Amino acid sequence: MGGKVRVKSSPQYTVHSPQSNCSTYEGLQGRIRALKTPKIEVWENQYPHKVYSVSMEIPEFTCICPKTGLPDFANIRIEYSPAKYCIELKSLKMYTIFFRNIGIFHEHLVNKFLEDFVKASKPRWAKITAEFNPRGGIKTVVSRQYKR
């Protein structure tokens, strides 16, 4: 029965083509630095005089490709040396979930993420690396470091 399949739309389940949101996502790129993201919370480090490092991985990060409107998947690695504050993980998770519906270029994501991370935690140094799954046969890895 090679007939066409009909998808019935309802207010709850509306079918959109990925391209319908592309201009919205592309328009956002000039305003990334002003994007209001959830607050990354911190807690006071009881060993601020010790120099050590912390590594975290977010293996299921998602955002939206601003050109196609399709999802982008990445593994994000955060490394930092806490000074006075350490990152509170639940707020970091909420921060990352915020990007699920945001159309953002890979390079903009890493820069925005690091700026927000440094503003919250004021670390000795930090590095964020985002390793994106291949898109169009091209794998992208973007990283940025911060040092006081």
Image (cartoon, rainbow, N blue to C red):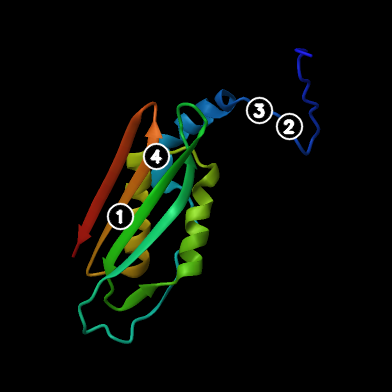
Distance between mark 3 and mark 4 Cα atoms: 23 Å
Labels 2 & 3 near each other (Cβ < 8 A): yes
Residue 131 place in picture, x, y as percent: 34, 45
Which residue is situated farthest in the front direction here?
1
Q: Mark 4 or mark 1, which has the lower sequence index? A: 1
Disc nearest the viewer among 2 and 4: 4
Residue 101 place in picture, x, y as percent: 55, 42
Disc 2 packing (10 Å; few <14; some 14–19; many ≥20): few
Q: Mark 1 or mark 2, which has the lower sequence index? A: 2
Q: Mark 3 or mark 1, which has the lower sequence index? A: 3
Above or below: residue 37 compared with residue 30:
below
Q: Mark 2 or mark 4, which has the lower sequence index? A: 2
Disc 4 packing (10 Å; few <14; some 14–19; many ≥20): some
Distance between mark 4 and mark 1 Cα atoms: 16 Å
Distance between mark 1 and mark 2 Cα atoms: 36 Å
Residue receiving disc 2: 14
Q: Residue at x 18, y 65 (%)?
A: 148
Which of the numbered marks, if any, corresponds to residue 128? 1
Residue receiving disc 3: 16
Does the rendering let one see residue 39?
no
Q: Residue at x 22, y 55 (%)?
A: 145
